[in-house]
Image: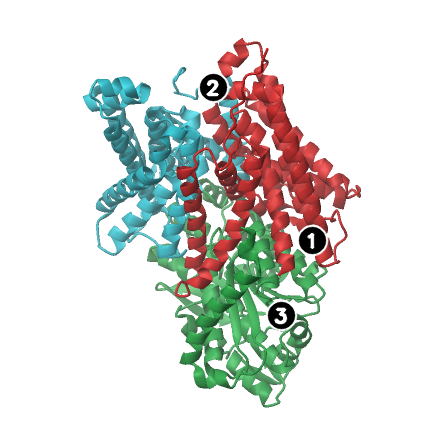
Chain colours: A red, B cyan, C green
Amino acid sequence: MLTYIVFILTIAAIYALLAQSLVPIWGQTGMVNLGLVGFFAVGAYASALLTRDFGWPVYLGPIVGLVAGGILGLIVTLSTLRLRDDYLAIVTLGFAEVVRIVASNEIWLTGGTDGIAGIPGVFERGTGLTFHVQFMVLTTLLCLVIGLLITRLVKSPWGRVLRAIRDDQIVASVAGKKVVRFKAQSFMLGASIAGLAGALYGSYISYIAPDLFLPLITIYVFLAATAGGNTRALGATVGAYLLVAWLEISRFIGEVVPVLSAVQIASLREIIVGLALVIVLRFAPGGLFKEKRQKAPVT
Amino acid sequence: MSFDILPQALVNGLMAGTVLAVPAIGFTAIFAIRGYPNFMIGAMATIGAYAGWMANSSAGFSLWAAVAVAFVAAALIGLVTEKVAVRPLEASGALTMAIASLAMSIVLENAIRFFFSNNLRGFDTPLERDVVMMGIRFGPQQLRNLLIALGIMVAIWAILKFTRFGRAMRASADNPDLARLKGVEPVRIADITIAMAMGLCGLGGALLAIDSSVDPMVGTRLLLSIFAAAVLGGLGSIPGAVVGALSIGIIEEMTVAYLAPAYRLAISFIVIILVLTFRPQGILGAKVR
Amino acid sequence: MRSFLDRNSINRRSLIKGIGAAATLTLAAPAILRAQEAPLRLGTLTPLTGAGGPYGPTMVDAVRKVVDNINGSGILKREIILVSEDSQTNPEAAVRAARKLIDVDQVSAIIGTWASAVTTAVAPMCWESKTMLFTVSGADSITQLPHDGYIIRTQPNTTLQGLKFGAFAIELGGKRVFFLTPQTPFADSQFVTITSSVEEAGGVTERLIYDDKKPSLRSEVDQALRFNPDVIILGGYTPDTTILMRDLYRSGFEGHLIGFGYSINQDLLNGLPADVVEGAYTLSPSPAEGSKAYDELAELVGVAAPDTYTCQVYDHINMILTTVAKAGGVSGTEIRDTIRSISQGGGTVVENATAGIEAVQAGEKVDYSGASGPCDFNDIGDIVDANFRYEQVVDGKITLLKIA
């Protein structure tokens, strides 16, 4: 029982990192990154390949994930510079699928649909509960640190520029801000956090495969960030923990209604996840942790 | 690189694209008039497919009648869902509505699965062999789908441009307050837009299912391609949706014929990025919204 | 949120389970009164949603019916508690579900993982916790993992399947064999073995890997036909095979079609017009001739021709129950150590759980032979051999041609 709880807390922390990655990109800059899972994948693959096949030390894995995510984030921003926000959402969705398709078909690089097994763990495996607790502490700490970092950045002048861009891009650029550079920075920050989450996930579970990186994960994380509040790291984090808790609690609902078949219980769980979100949106539209309006600085 | 397969590949692409066209029209109409991307279109296509299938196989409706049933069922279910779950969030902005529609799409797909499980169903109709014209093979049902898509496109475009109602819809989209002052009821407009768009998705789903099969994911499998079609053609443009759909169909079949079939989605998206880089509004999109 | 997961809630849950169990108990009172030993906890982890959705529900149904039968008759002398989770055909969800099955439900075995990625993701936590994993996944790499005997796989590996398919294509008179498949862990290995079979008889092969999410596969079919094949082998699953068969029919292809039993199954037949599927051949792993297990299973689940995945999980549960009866204990390790003594090595042939348990309790040496094959396993958990059932769709029904 304890292992399960520690395990779920670790997964929740990883989801929280994914949700936090949306704060600079989406919450602060208004860019809808529906390709989230693609950055998750790139971080996971880069870290897994380098630590398993090229003998890089395991503690470099998460850093590799961070860097890989950031690089892909830069590529995506540069390719979508001229796109309006509405188009960006759909194009980033496509990006994630491209990553998955390449991962599935370029067998020489990624092992194809077979995936990559035996990924070295940042901590030694086979120590039972200890391994899980070590990972939980690591991921939760990272989640905390990065959450604090994002919170500081949000409050900083850099954050103000992002929000200016989000609220009115044209005004921001007329005011002399190099919109493209800020967008790129914001996107890269978010993308690298997602890449870090991917590296951690691969290292924890020891196996990744293209089928893991489905749009459903992006959808779940978006739901979490929206429910929790996508402009604040605190909101995103709480949203993610709530999401994972809800995903797990919904299992037990099935046991209360024994007349349903297994597939009906499975569908019911998914329905409950969707409905819960809509209800949160209805009664707390900015999320549970809404944006704090910053006062203009006294000059 | 043989060019004698080109004509057939082009025709295949056109035929494949027709399946995307009708749901893409629905998607882009909601975007144009309601102002947000509605992610329920895949699930609505599935609902239309199931409604049409039930009408056809249990109640013995003909294919045309079944497709009509699909339209009506999807229009009703889509409208109710949107009014209850999405529209109340209008004040929170387009993105929030989009997310809510995403959540409802999960709910709807699984509601179907709850009642029908995952078994494959088929319409009660014999399969027609291809018609061969000038050495190129055409599927009769797909030809019909193409005509239907074109017909719908013309009909909607005409309604929007020439009827008072259509003008009211466009007015409401551009400036709801002013439109209301002029006596245009925005709620009514929104209702009819949504009902029509969802109905179209359902119709498209039924047409697709007639030619393949019915399972809970029949519509959601196409989601990405429908988005791609609407975006390529220019979000908000009805003719753009059709042009985009046919273009996506052709791009994908070209990928299959000349590159690697497994990469067809990837190539589509790369093409879209290229097109949008040089023409940010899409093929037929309006320059300023 | 944390409070839900604390002790009180667990007791509350057990109470709810207890009420449910009490209800069942009153229906089966005489049988269960005799049960005094610790219950056997098992879990199924099949795809109920996602790409594998067409297969999961029937698999769970088969396992559940066997469990209900044995619980009802009480011959195992212990209660079987079965928990079913959804793998969502997604390793991320599957891993959480498996963790719950292992740590919360404390199952001794997990049955029915389908997608190879799901199985590979879940395997390490199974062998680390000494939980048995019974899988139907096909990727060769699965049994190569360091699983310490905790994986049993009833799906024949791709080498065997490829050889059988290639040989059958030749038998049908094929000289030009085309393989149409989506990207799977066995797309390569199967093609290699099909080719070696076909080339040995002087034929040629070619392959196309398609995207299985397309609503139309016309161009792919066109490309296949340009090769002028006389036999086409289909490697996908039901949803995409449905589309392929339609497009093949429309194109007027006159040659032979061979598909895997899990794609040309009853579900496919229900979804397609009769003349589209008519004449298609299918191969499935099978027990030797004279086995009654397949027919018993068909009757149990109410499906005229249950596909191989359903057959395999039926064998999984039967073997587990027989093993537990023999081992006298319920742990995953005991199942691992005892299973081969009931699944192979000669003795009274048993084909279902009831027969197996009764024979074991009577002190006999048993050899389980199931609906999916003789169920004899080597050291790394692969089946040693399988016959295949060669079937053809005749007059809209899946008809047996031969077993070989």
Left of B203 or right of it: where is C307? right
Distance from disc 1 to disc 3, alpha carbons, whole Å, reads 39 Å
Q: Residue under mark 2: which chain is it in?
A: B
Q: Nearer the viewer, mark 2 or mark 3?
A: 2
Front residue of B1 and B176 = B176
> Mark 2 sits on what residue?
B280
Residue linked to disc 3: C385
At horizontal 62% and vertical 32% (from top left) the residue drawn is A191
For the C terminus of chain A, the image quarter is top right
In the image: residue B40, left or right of residue A171? left
Q: Quadrant of residue C217?
A: top left
What is the three-letter code of the residue carrying label 1?
A: His
- The answer to whether residue B258 of the structure is visible from this angle is no
| Residue C395 in view | yes
- Chain hosting mark 3: C
Toward which corner of the image does residue B88 lie, by quadrant?
Answer: top left
Amino acid type for the residue under numbered disc 3: Asp
